Image (cartoon, grey):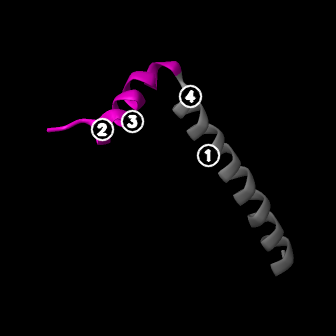
Amino acid sequence: MDHQTISQFSGIFGLIFFGILFAGVVVYALWPRNKKKFDHAARLPLEED
């Protein structure tokens, strides 16, 4: 394996890895069970102590 082959493989692997990671974060953020937690976090700056 030469440097160019390794570079291409790592670029493709990195793209696939971060694509899957991004999809996982989006699914987690939009999952209905997490709605209450995110709604609460969105209201925190507006609440007074």
Location of residue 49 (image quadrant): top left
Q: Residues within 10 Å of mark 4 (few under 14, many from 20)?
A: few
Q: Mark 2 or mark 4: name the one nearer the start of the chain.
A: 4
Q: Mark 1 or mark 3: name the one nearer the start of the chain.
A: 1
Residue under circle 3? 42
Disc number lying in front (1 or 2): 2
Q: In screen coordinates, is 26 left or right of 8?
A: left
The answer to whether residue 8 shows anywhere in this view is: yes
Residue in the image at 56% along x and 28% along y: 30
Per the rendered image, the range of residues in magenta is 32-49
Q: Return the x and y of residue 45 as percentages of the image width and height.
A: 30, 42
Disc number lying in front (2 or 3): 2
Q: Amino acid at mark 1?
A: Leu
Residue in the image at 59% along x and 31% along y: 27
- In what quadrant of the picture does the N terminus appear? bottom right
Residue under circle 4? 30
Relative to 6, residue 35 above or below: above
Q: Amino acid at mark 2?
A: Leu
